Image (cartoon, rainbow, N blue to C red):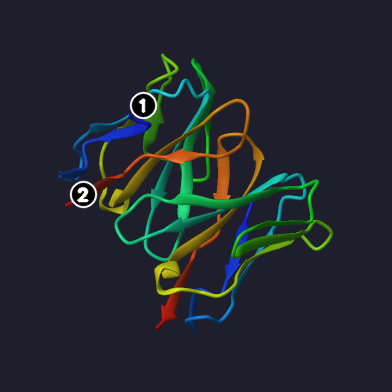
Amino acid sequence: GENVEQHPSTLSVQEGDSAVIKCTYSDSASNYFPWYKQELGKRPQLIIDIRSNVGEKKDQRIAVTLNKTAKHFSLHITETQPEDSAVYFCAASRTKGKLIFGQGTTLQVKP
Amino acid sequence: NAGVTQTPKFQVLKTGQSMTLQCAQDMNHEYMSWYRQDPGMGLRLIHYSVGAGITDQGEVPNGYNVSRSTTEDFPLRLLSAAPSQTSVYFCASSPVGNNEQFFGPGTRLTVL
């Protein structure tokens, strides 16, 4: 079945450093790859997404890269700040309305 | 717009009870989905709908029913609650024009 693996499960960085979270997916027909940020007790919020016809997308300090051949995609956060501390989820989709999520990465940014 | 709303925010059930989690959106989105979130397991898709009258199963559909009689509403029914259904439930919707899913605030369900 469809599966998304996410690593690492926890990540601790110093403020100002970069953070990288990686995901692999099993369904080669997946064509949409969003990343969500979830703060404690809150709903997931979309921070960036990429479609299968694009290799990289950047939005200020956040970037996502996609390697369709290897079926993996990554989230890159540069110049991390304490407010970046949260749980981050990757997801993959081949059908609208149907997201398959990774297990999540808890990012801690130490001041 | 209120966006995606869910009721109740919290619920405690006894094993064997039934109940319906409500989800509504006022954005005229065609696509709606239900997820459950358990510690260390991310969000798992329960059921989803691509429009009024059309529903399909996700990764973990057993023990749950859905229907989509209107574009706005997508209720999730627990037929006979079990402790394994203790979780946080999120409803989400997305428009025809793009894939972004907008999440509701969630319902925290405890089954004793």
Numbered disc 1: secondary structure: loop
Residue A105 vs residue A50: left or right?
left
Nearer the observer: mark 1 or 2; the answer is 1
Q: Are marks 1 and 2 on the same chain?
A: yes
Q: Is residue A25 above or below residue B35?
A: below
The residue lying toward the viewer, choosing from A24 and B20, is: A24
Whether residue A34 is visible: no
Residue kind at label 1, given as amino acid type: Asn
- Check disc 1 and report the residue beneath it: B1
Foreground: A21 or B90?
A21
- Classify 10 Å Cα crowding around label 1: few (below 14), some (14-19), many (20 and above): few
Instruction: Look at mark 2 in the image and give the residue it sits on.
Output: B111
Quarter of the figure with the C terminus of chain A: bottom left
The chain that hosts pointer 1 is B
Residue at 43% across, 77% down: A108
The x and y percentages for residue A99 are: 57, 44
Which residue is rendered at x = 52% and y = 80% of the image?
A16
Q: Is residue A65 above or below residue B71?
A: below
User: Is residue A39 shown left or right of residue B108?
Assistant: right
Residue B39 rendering spot, x and y as whole percentages: 37, 63
Amino acid of disc 2: Val
In this orientation, which residue lies closer to the viewer: B35 or A13?
A: A13
